[in-house]
Image (tube, grey):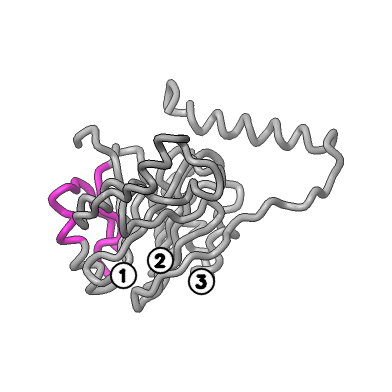
């Protein structure tokens, strides 16, 4: 594998297969939907992607997360439908993209912090998502958006609400608090997956929970030795 790490998310249909053909020249790895059609395409290290499967359901974690394939498969087995992904993912620690394929539908999101982003664009008559906007742009032959580039000369990263604007024409960023949904007919839309929770306890009572969450996140980054 080259040092160029990236991934693309493809819908489960013939249009997704056509888009995969355009991306294969850059890709070294492929993971399939239950149907056998390409689902995840790209280049990543051996430990970079963990996939769980249960029947026609697939769940993938890409990034820093200590979950095993067996544990993820058990969670996938509890999926009722594509809208159930966050429930079965509850308790996963680290920094990662979370992607699911359920009965022909795809759901994908990054992290609420914005450290893990997603970008999407139309390609071969279908919406295709990726973790890198430059990969989407290269495959499409997209040109830079000069207005957004000019804004980056003034402030980079851009302040809210301009931070969700992509520098490539035709490529759109998925807001950090949203997930991307692509149905079996290749229609795509975004949906809010995270909102700041209402306070339920005094700050002194919340300190142990915050400490435990931070410790778990650090462990997810260092479990394999060193920092990732």
Q: Quadrant of residue 54?
A: bottom left
Residue 33 is inside the magenta segment: yes
Q: Secondary structure at mark 1?
A: loop
Vertical relation: 77 (above or below) 48? below
> Can I make out residue 34 in this image?
no
How far is the residue under mark 1 from the one under mark 2?
A: 8 Å
Position of residue 222 in the picture relative to residue 34 (left or right) = right
Give the mark nearest the N terminus, 2 or 3.
3
Do the numbered discs 1 and 2 sit on residues whose CB atoms are within 8 Å? Answer: yes
Give the mark nearest the N terminus, 1 or 2.
1
Label 3: which residue?
81
Along the line of sight, which residue is nearer the eye, 217 or 52? 217
Vertical relation: 123 (above or below) 145? below
Q: Quadrant of the N terminus?
A: top left
Do the numbered discs 2 and 3 sit on residues whose CB atoms are within 8 Å? Answer: no
Label 1: which residue?
12
Residue 83, numbered label: none
Badge 3: residue crowd in 10 Å (few <14, some 14–19, many ≥20): few
Label 2: which residue?
106
Q: Secondary structure at mark 2?
A: strand
């Amino acid at each position: 594998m080259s040092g160029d790490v990236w991934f693309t998310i493809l819908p489960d249909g013939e249009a997704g297969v056509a888009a995969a053909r355009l991306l294969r020249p850059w890709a070294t790895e492929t993971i399939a939907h239950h149907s056998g059609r390409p689902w995840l395409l790209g280049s990543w290290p051996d430990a970079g992607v963990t996939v769980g499967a249960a029947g026609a359901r697939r769940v993938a974690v890409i990034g820093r997360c200590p979950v095993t394939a067996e544990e993820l498969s058990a969670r996938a087995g509890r999926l009722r439908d594509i809208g159930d992904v966050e429930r079965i993912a509850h308790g996963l620690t680290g920094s990662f993209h979370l992607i699911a394929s359920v009965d022909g539908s795809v759901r994908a999101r990054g992290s609420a912090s914005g450290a893990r982003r997603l970008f999407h664009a139309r390609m071969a008559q279908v919406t295709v998502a990726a973790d890198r906007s430059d990969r989407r742009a290269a495959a499409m032959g997209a040109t830079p958006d000069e207005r957004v580039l000019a804004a980056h000369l003034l402030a980079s990263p851009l302040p809210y609400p301009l931070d969700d604007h992509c520098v490539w024409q035709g490529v759109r960023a998925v807001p950090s608090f949203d997930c991307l949904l692509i149905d079996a007919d290749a229609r795509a839309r975004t949906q809010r997956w995270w909102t700041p929770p209402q306070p339920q306890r005094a700050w002194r009572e919340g300190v142990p929970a915050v400490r435990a969450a931070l410790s778990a996140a650090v462990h997810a980054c260092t479990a394999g030795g060193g920092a990732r």
